[in-house]
Amino acid sequence: MATTRLKGQASFIVAHPHAAAVDIGAYSHFVAVPQERAEKPVREFGCDTAQLDGMAEWLHECGVQTVALESTGIYWIPVYEVLQARGLDVWLVNPKHTRNVTGRKSDVLDCQWLQQLHTFGLLNRAFRPAASVCEVRELVRLRSTMIDERTRHVQRMQSALTQMNVQLTSVLSDIAGETGMAIIRAIVAGERDSRKLAALRNYRVRASEVDVAKALRGTWKREHMFKLEHELLCYDFINTRLQAIDAQLEEWLRALAVHDKEPEGRRSRRAKNAPSFDIRKALLNWSGVDLTSIPGIEAITAMKLLTELGPELQRFKTAKSLCSWLGLCPGTKITGGKRLDGKTKRLPNRASQALKEAASGLARSKCAMGAYYRRLALRMNTSKAITAVAHKLARIVYAMLTGQCTYDPERAQKHDERYNQRVLKNLRQRASRLGFDLVESSAQTAA
């Protein structure tokens, strides 16, 4: 779109002459259009669907082509979807970037200020994936919430057992495992004999049957028994709903598949909270690349990344812009030629959190990426090393999705070899300066 200049304001360039803005609220929305487009350039609309349709019609009557609105809670989602469905170019912006309003603050002034910023192109558009990706993303987020709720019910079952002095956690590492759930279900069913309960022990449990029987002698008070039965019912209900969510997720991912590939390499052991279907194959046929081939990224992590970002990252021009959006880049707080702060931005980004969890899992890995993490952890603290490795993983993910290429572990291995050669060269130089010679051992020479 060609840009024009306002008279008397040569320094301001009108980037969006047909721009409007919406100040989002819980009970009503205020909409501002250019002054010359309507007799009342600011109007208030309700939150129901009929009012939102009326908002879209009024914007079309005013000749508006693009609309900016703040991402306030979840109240912006219906407005965004209705306006986008009516053919308007909707810009979702960060409320923190539009707070510098002089004078008294009101909804009318906020929407007018937002409209002026959008007109002059002073707002950055937030990233929002395609509608099909948002559907799957909402389902994956719901699944994560349900898993968190299930964990809370397990904790409450553990609390009820402890109050009855049933020390099940002293002999089992996870009471939600096969042995733990079998014992809990037997207790709820009315069994009180500790020896019969200990007989439900799986052969893989390290504690002996005698030790398990000693830990299962409790007081069996009825208030704690009622709590245990209640939490067990809630736990089973969530498991049932998780099966329904997994079935729906499998169906939606099958509909999004554009490839017909089989994962290469050995199939890894199914994680504890992984979906019940082959999520690795479903993600491969959706994105075209196998992100689980990257060290540290499991099937659940790949699922979170693809549902948060989508398989197409053309919205980010470079890997640097993606890392900046993820909050994995060093800060640039500089004034007067002096760097005040270099901390990374604290963003509630689920994709960034998934990458950091993957990076922290590389602490004891024997691959090249694990060695890279340990080298960084020696020079800086653990949190900074995790952020740096997550930044590296984000670059690899961007390269694989945009270039439709596979991960090459030999390239990372060669990088480690060059690093070892540099370290060896520096050690030889230091030994030479101190008057010593660095001699390789026979085992190293044979290797």
Image (cartoon, rainbow, N blue to C red):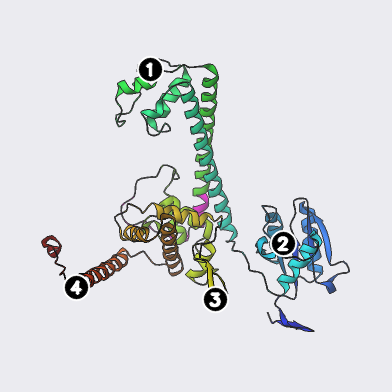
Mark 3 touching mark 2, by CB under 8 A?
no
Q: Earlier in the sequence, mark 4 or mark 2?
A: 2
Determine which residue is flagged by label 3: 337
Tag shown at residue 346? none
Q: Earlier in the sequence, mark 3 or mark 2?
A: 2
Q: Is residue 438 left or right of 46 when viewed as pictured?
A: left
Alpha carbon separation for disc pair 3 and 2: 44 Å
Frontmost residue, 143 versus 255: 143
Residue 286 on image: x %, y %: 47, 58
Does residue 418 sit above or below 359 in this rendering? below
Q: Is residue 361 left or right of 67 when viewed as pictured?
A: left
Does residue 46 sit above or below 241 in this rendering? below
Was residue 214 drawn as part of the magenta stretch in this picture? no
Determine which residue is flagged by label 1: 194
Frontmost residue, 244 versus 219: 219
Determine which residue is flagged by label 2: 83
Residue 337 on image: x %, y %: 54, 76
Span highlighted in magenta in the image: 251-270
Q: Secondary structure at mark 3?
A: loop
Does residue 259 sit above or below 431 in this rendering? above
The kind of secondary structure the magenta stretch mainly shows is loop
Tag shown at residue 432? 4
Circle 4 or circle 2, nearest the eye: 4
Q: Residue at x 55, y 26 (%)?
A: 230
